[in-house]
Amino acid sequence: MGNHHSACLGDISKRSCCPKVDAIKGATADILTGLKKQPVMFKWVDQNCRLVEIAGLDVGWSQKIPLVFDEGQGSWILNRELPEGHYEYKYVVDGEWVCNKNEAVTSPNQDGHINNYVLVLADDPDSDNAKLRQRLSSDDPDLTADERIRIRQFLEQLSSE
């Protein structure tokens, strides 16, 4: 029985872990900058489709947010407030996942997928928050002792709620 138990633990300990480092960096910056949001508009120009949605952004790839058709513009529109950061997304037009060629696109990722992306910045790119976000999104981010304390306090407050 003891061997069976350790065999199970052995299997569990071999499970691979693939943290999304950019998401962790972004969440850290969100905590330290006070979760300030900026308005962003997404637009799909096509009058011949029945439904346009967007996936990715701040809701993940498994959820979709519908765009609303604006007859005056002849376009599908989504106005959304997002915290500062880099967001990848794709449009889902009548069930088909597509990139908008009129918006910024990523290089192919590990799986070969290309996505649209938006970089949401503070009104003032020289602000302390913008500099902090830039530092934390670098290849070698480092938190100060004060930043570590602030994050710990934030997480402890969350866990007590």
Image: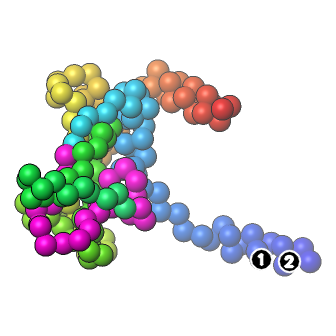
What segment carries the magenta color? 41-63
x then y, percent, for residue 66? 31, 59
Image quadrant containing the C terminus:
top right
Within the image, what quadrant is residue 60 found in? Answer: bottom left
Of 68 and 42, which appears nearest the observer?
68
Identified by mark 2, the residue type is: Asn
Q: Say whether residue 108 is visible.
A: no
Q: Which residue in the structure is indicated by mark 2? A: 3
x then y, percent, for residue 91? 24, 65
Q: Which residue in the structure is indicated by mark 1? A: 7
x then y, percent, for residue 117? 21, 55
Number of dots carrying numbers: 2
Residue at horizontal 32 percent and vertical 53 percent from the top: 57
**Dot 1 surroundings within 10 Å: few (below 14), some, or many (20 or more)?**
few
* Residue 6 against residue 125 in the figure, above or below: below
* Residue 148 against residue 13 in the figure, above or below: above
Q: Secondary structure at mark 1?
A: helix
Residue at horizontal 24 percent and vertical 55 percent from the top: 68
Residue extending furthest toward the right = 1
Within the image, what quadrant is residue 48 found in? Answer: bottom left
Q: Secondary structure at mark 2?
A: helix
Q: Marks 1 and 2: CB-CB under 8 Å?
A: yes
